Image: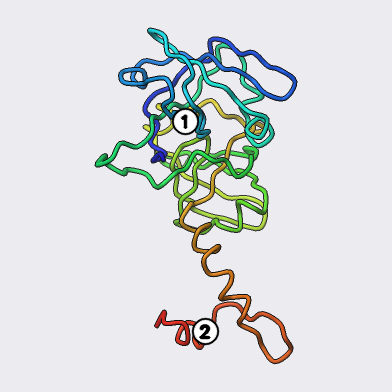
Amino acid sequence: MFTGIVEELGEVLGRQFNKESAVLFIKGRKVLEDLKVGDSIAVNGVCLTATKVTGDAFYADVMPETMRRTNLQDLKIGEKVNLERALAAGGRLGGHFVSGHIDGTGILLREQREGNAVIKCFSAPPEVLRYALVKGSIAVDGVSLTIVDVDDTSFKVSLIPHTLQQTVLYYRKPGDKVNLEADLLGKYLEKFLAPLLSREKNGKGQRQGLTMSFLSENGFI
């Protein structure tokens, strides 16, 4: 489990791509202070396992499922990546709960400056946008952000100077691909409510969704 608060920018020192998988060799500093083989570490928001740790870098395997769903397949030697160690028990939760399991990728469509902030607009697939709401949380390349606007095909986030300076979002330009993870709480809530919602029918046998009577009958109010 992660928080979406990036600890440092790492650098891709090497990569070995096989037919469907890969091995990444990534340079870091802060995240290596207590990193051990077998520990989880988020790379651009993707939960990977450190398979070897050297003095200033670590290795991580990337399986086919991860290659298909993320932008790790596009990484180049010398490219910067967001790094975050797993949340320690009792640690501060400055962002939101981030699992490191990417739901899909989006594309940076456009950006504009607004005062001291930069507004970035990203396209996103339906499986991500279904959980997106204004003032809700989303992880973009592993960065915990707050959505400021959303429509049927995209969402916007507002980035303060610190976030831009400390993450790879500073380098993202229109057309670049980013990893997206929807709010974990929203996904679990939908899963838990699905059996109950499927039994809520109207007179024509169609599902009505949440109603006051449904909430009352099932003990929510």
- Type of amino acid at the residue the image marks with label 2: Phe
Q: Residue at x 57, y 38 (%)?
A: 111
The x and y percentages for residue 37 are 42, 20
With respect to residue 144, does 186 lie above or below? Answer: below
Front-most of residues 89 and 128:
89
Q: Residues within 10 Å of mark 1 (few under 14, many from 20)?
A: many
Sequence-earlier tag: 2 or 1: 1
Tell me if 196 is positioned left or right of 73 in this view: left
Q: In the figure, residue 39 lies in which quadrant?
A: top left
Q: Position of residue 177 (x, y in %)?
A: 64, 33
Tag 2: Cα neighbours inside 10 Å, few (<14), some, or many (≥20)? some
Q: Nearer the viewer, residue 205 or 139?
A: 205
Residue 140 placement (x, y as % from top left): 52, 39
Three-letter code for the amino acid on which mark 1 is drawn: Ala
The reply to whether callout 2 and callout 1 are in contact (CB within 8 Å) is no
> Considering the numbered disc 1 on the image, is that residue within a helix, a strand or a loop?
strand
Image coordinates of residue 126 in percent, x first then y, are 67, 54
Residue at the spot 41% in from the left edge and 16% down from the top edge: 28
Looking at the image, residue 139 lies above or below residue 61: below
* Residue pointed to by mark 1: 42
Image: 81 above or below 122: above
Q: Quadrant of the N terminus?
A: top left
Residue that mark 2 sits on: 214
